[in-house]
Amino acid sequence: MARRVKLILQAAAVMVVALLVVLLGWQVARQEEGRGLDDAVAAGKRPPAPDFTLESLDGDETISLSDYRGRAVVLNFWASWCQPCKKEAPLLQLAWERYRGEGLVVLGVDAQDLKSDARRFVERYGLTYPIVHDRNGVTLGRFGYSAFPETWFVDRQGRLVGEHVVGEFTEEQLVRNIRLALDS
Amino acid sequence: MIRALILACAVALAAAGAAWASEERPTLAELEQELWCPTCNAPLALSNAPVADRIRAFVRQRIAAGDTKSEIKAKLVDSFGEDVLASPPREGFNLLAWVLPLAGGVAAAAVLGVAARRWSRGRSGEDPPLEASTNGRGPLDPDVERRLDEELARFDA
């Protein structure tokens, strides 16, 4: 009887350790996913952009990146407390107005931010492009977030193209990468 | 016994009163200990990150508006997810974070208890403890004592 109990306890201990190893592996794999994307884009490859579904900042709908398949997407990760984001917002709005006729969507992903602050930010800068809220920062992690703002460019086939811009982009950088996303 | 019971009830009532006051009228200092900065992986109280400053301003504003501690936390969770809480809520899957350390402690105590019992049983199966001598010196080794008994028996004979 004692031997049986001992065996059961040993099996339970092995299972707990195995579970912890699996959890650790899962966490490392998620972190590597973002780094892998960065490396691939830097090497001129066009990896598929990880799909995600998030609630809009207004909370009245959910938006998936794959909803925009067939259109080019400027994916901008931002937060209202981020200073460079304040400089980027008017440029993103201009790009949205200028290129949407050609099939471009600007998709803002607000993260690590108070929703009320983000809504005020949107109102202040008159942003009309779709904006979603990454409540847990999970999507941010999948794209290998390192600092706000970060911008990715997605082509019509849902692939990441051009540059992964970490920090504030220049107008020239924005236009060049939009062109690349629209034309590829 | 009754006195101890009354004392325990008084302590429990006082603790419940303090908890109620903290829930109804939270302070920024309290909430700073119970919240986590989402960008810097540190308690809010120790963070100077821009988002931490925004959270502090939000908490001040909600305290002034009369929100309870739970309401303020719920609003922050709505924006940042549960990662903004220094300790996970005691519900659902998060309950594991509270139960597992407790279960681990109980299991470790049980294992230690069983091991100690086995050890003491093993000890009792060995030679009986040596009797203390009366001359102030340590007890004799059983082997020496046996030989001494034999010698004395031979001498008596």
Image (cartoon, coloured by chain):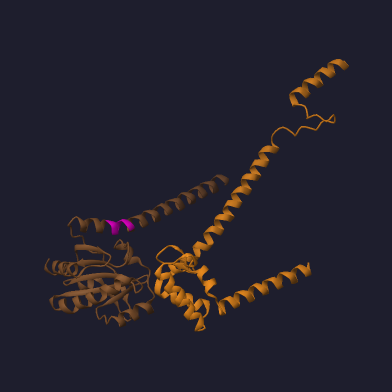
Chain colours: A brown, B orange
Asked which quadrant contains residue B115, the reply is top right
Residue A154, position as x, y percentages in the image:
20, 67
Q: Which residue is rendered at x = 20% and y = 75% of the image?
A: A105
- Residue B99 versus residue A5 in the image, above or below: below
Residue B117, position as x, y percentages in the image:
66, 45
Q: Is-magenta flag for residue A33?
A: yes
On screen, residue B20 versus residue A126, left or right, reads right
**Residue B81 appears in the figure:** no
Quarter in which the C terminus of chain B is drawn? top right
Residue B101, position as x, y percentages in the image:
54, 58
**Residue A77 appears in the figure:** yes
Quarter in which the N terminus of chain B is drawn? bottom right
On screen, residue A35 versus residue B154, left or right, reads left
On screen, residue A16 versus residue A95, left or right, reads right
Instruction: Tell which of B150 and B34 is nearer to you.
Output: B34
- Residue A46 versus residue B27 in the image, above or below: above
Q: Which residue is rendered at x = 28% and y = 65% of the image?
A: A167
Where are the magenta residues, as a range? A31-35
Farthest residue to the right: give it: B156
Q: Is-magenta flag for residue A148?
A: no
Instruction: Tell which of B14 and A50 is nearer to you.
Output: B14
Residue B14, position as x, y percentages in the image:
67, 74
Farthest residue to the left: give it: A183
Q: Which residue is rendered at x = 35% and y = 77% of the image?
A: A118
How many marks the image carries: the answer is 0
